[in-house]
Amino acid sequence: MKIHRLDKMLVLVWLGIAVCFITGCAAEQGTSAKQEAEDYLHAKTKDMQRWRQMRFGMFVHWGPVSLKGTEIGWSRGGKRPGSGGGTGSIPVEIYDNLYKRFNPIKFDADEWIQLAKDSGMKYFVFTTKHHDGFSMFDSKLTDYKITNSPFKRDVVKELADACHRKGIKLGFYYSQPDWYHPDFLTDDHDRYIKFLHGQLRELLSNYGTVDIMWFDGLGGRKHPEWWDSENMFKLIRSLQPDIIINNRGGLAGDHDTPEQKIGNFQNDRPWETCMTIGRQWAWKPNDDIKSLKQCLQTLVRTAGGDGNFLFNVGPMPDGRIEPGQADTLRGMGQWLKKYGQSIYGTRGGPFKPGKWGASTYRGKKIYVHVLNWKDDSIVLPAIDKKIVKSSVLTGGKADVEQTDQGIKISIPKEHHKDIDTIVILKLNGRGDDIAPVDVEE
């Protein structure tokens, strides 16, 4: 069949279009593949928003070391690779055999998670393995684990199931440093990486939905090669696509983790203060427990700095959370039932935290948390929004004067609350349109 010149031109045009389409698709696929390859570094925006809105979670450090009442991991004798040196007070041969006597017969996962709910906590993070290398789950990759103790039960499974039943978001703490494993930071460290990734695969495959991966890399926080972090992150996201990962896994992760202190005001990157209710992460007999006022004001200041609060308890050797600690946590929950609207789902600011207190906002409402009064009034900086209404969430009445120089809030002394006096300022615009500002004290 003969093809005329015009037909040939049409064929060439269509071939050109086809080539452009194919190469364009290939380029688009390349961009898509690149985007997909980069996504493992960051959590989805919706998952970070959900986590931020929860604001308050329970952290639990627990293991056979509770039999001694000393610090988990750090009280173990022997070398501490990747930590900068030092050693613990309990000889290795004693510490590493504590699990043979560990039988916490009063452990009840539902009681723990119900306590978290009663305390107003929205998520739960448990130590599946600390630096001492002991696995609190039924790992197939080691014999040094809870199911080889007299207790025999998989603690992680019971806690995961309880979280899923009760609607609490689940997080796993996992220490990459492992002072028990013979290959850790040795010439055979590649074998340890295989073990590390294998245990993560178990944790993220066998326990249902996991919302949070909480690493604790010590000296390896800035050494992604110690953990093969890029492949580790890819593995995690492939198994749990909606998970968030903290900043201690060798890469930046999704949020910062100031420890045993309230983080600075920071609203451009998520953060979470982790802190103990006493002085020790693991259970300590007669520990110095924070008062209800200290606990709640820490939560308020953290939220006011735009951070989350992960609050730690260390259960006793029999599996119970110490009654006094539990009562304090329930006290937090009772306060949050009344005033939680000023914490959950808010952002920090626009008035930055200080000795005076803190502020949070949601939509057109600013919640002013006055924690320390000098007299019957407090003066806040001027803002470019008009206050159209005010009220006192904690009871009483406030006199609010707004000028170009600032905002003066006056409340009679009899309506000052020892823990937190909360004033609601309703604006004619959104709080997120106001630049954060320091308060002079």
Image (cartoon, helix red, strand yellow):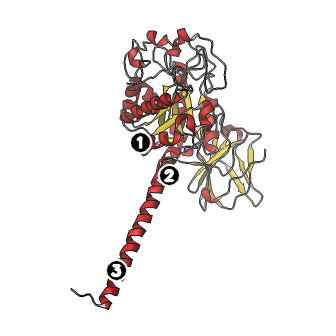
Q: Please report whichever mark, 3 or 2, sits nearer to the chain's N-terminal start.
A: 3
Between disc 3 and disc 1, the foreground one is 3
Secondary-structure class at tag 3? helix
Q: Please report whichever mark, 3 or 1, sits nearer to the chain's N-terminal start.
A: 3
Residue that badge 2 annotates: 38
Q: Quadrant of the N terminus?
A: bottom left
Between disc 1 and disc 2, the foreground one is 2
Query: What percent of the width, then of the height, locates residue 19?
Result: 38, 73
Estimate how packed mark 2 is, as few (under 14), some (14 to 19) or many (20 or more) residues with alpha carbons within 10 Å: few
Secondary-structure class at tag 1? loop
Query: What percent of the width, then of the height, locates residue 180?
Result: 52, 19
Depth check: give the residue in front, 201 or 5: 5
415 displayed left or right of 308: right
Residue that badge 1 annotates: 240
Residue 175 shows up from this direction: no
Residue that badge 3 annotates: 14
What amino acid is found at the position of numbered circle 2 in the picture?
Glu
For residue 231, the mark is: none
240 displayed left or right of 94: left
> Quarter of the image holding residue 279?
top right
What amino acid is found at the position of numbered circle 3 in the picture?
Trp
